[in-house]
Amino acid sequence: MANVRRLWPGQAGTLYYELSHMTSIANCYTDLGRRDEALALERSLYAKTTAAYGIEAREALINALNLSRSLINMGRAAEAKPFLRKNITRARRSLGDDHHVTLDLRDRYVRTLVAPLVEDPGSASAAGDLREAVTILEDIEGRSRRVFGADHPQTLGYKESLVTAR
């Protein structure tokens, strides 16, 4: 962050810009395959954002979404699952059921349900997790279609996930 402060002295003093730059750096780490560093930075971002704006702030929920993406991509769906449950509840309460961040958190949660099924389709919880995933996808696809329209990229993505899950 010293470079950010040096290169953008007028902006670096504000928390918003500091968090924004940290997010960009975390994305670069991810793109470079430096997932451990990205995950550590995303954990830090989530902690700073929740401390600054509150646990239910849109900014904190977006960072929760980013952190959960990294956890899932690193094969840590079991860790992401309870984290997402808590943040979905917060997003519903503060943003509402139809907000794109709430929908994305729920979609990410679906990924935690189906991730173990890919590795062990015959597991004892497979049928129940798949049913729950389909139920959630049906709801978020319908909400997205109603709020954003049938041709919106987000709606199309949810629809594709639903077809795959069925």
Image (cartoon, helix red, strand yellow):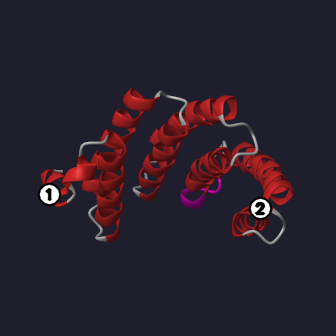
- Residue 104 coordinates in the image, percent (x, y): 63, 51
Q: Is residue 120 magenta?
A: yes
Q: Is residue 14 magenta?
A: no
Residue highlighted by disc 1: 3
Residue highlighted by disc 2: 162
- Tell me the element at label 2: helix
Magenta segment main secondary structure: loop
The residue segment tinted magenta is 118-122
Can you tell which of label 1 and label 2 is closer to the viewer? 1
Classify residue 85 by image quadrant.
Answer: top right
Q: Nearer the viewer, residue 70 or 17?
A: 17
- Residue 46 coordinates in the image, percent (x, y): 39, 39
Q: Which mark is residue 88?
A: none
Q: Nearer the viewer, residue 157 or 45?
A: 45
Position of residue 124 in the picture relative to residue 31 (left or right): right
Say how many tags the image has: 2
- Tell me the element at label 1: helix
Task: Tell me which residue sits at (30%, 52%) in the image.
Answer: 22
Q: Nearer the viewer, residue 33 or 145?
A: 145
Pointer 1 or 2: first along the chain: 1
- Residue 38 coordinates in the image, percent (x, y): 30, 55
Task: Tell me which residue sits at (81%, 54%) in the image.
Answer: 147
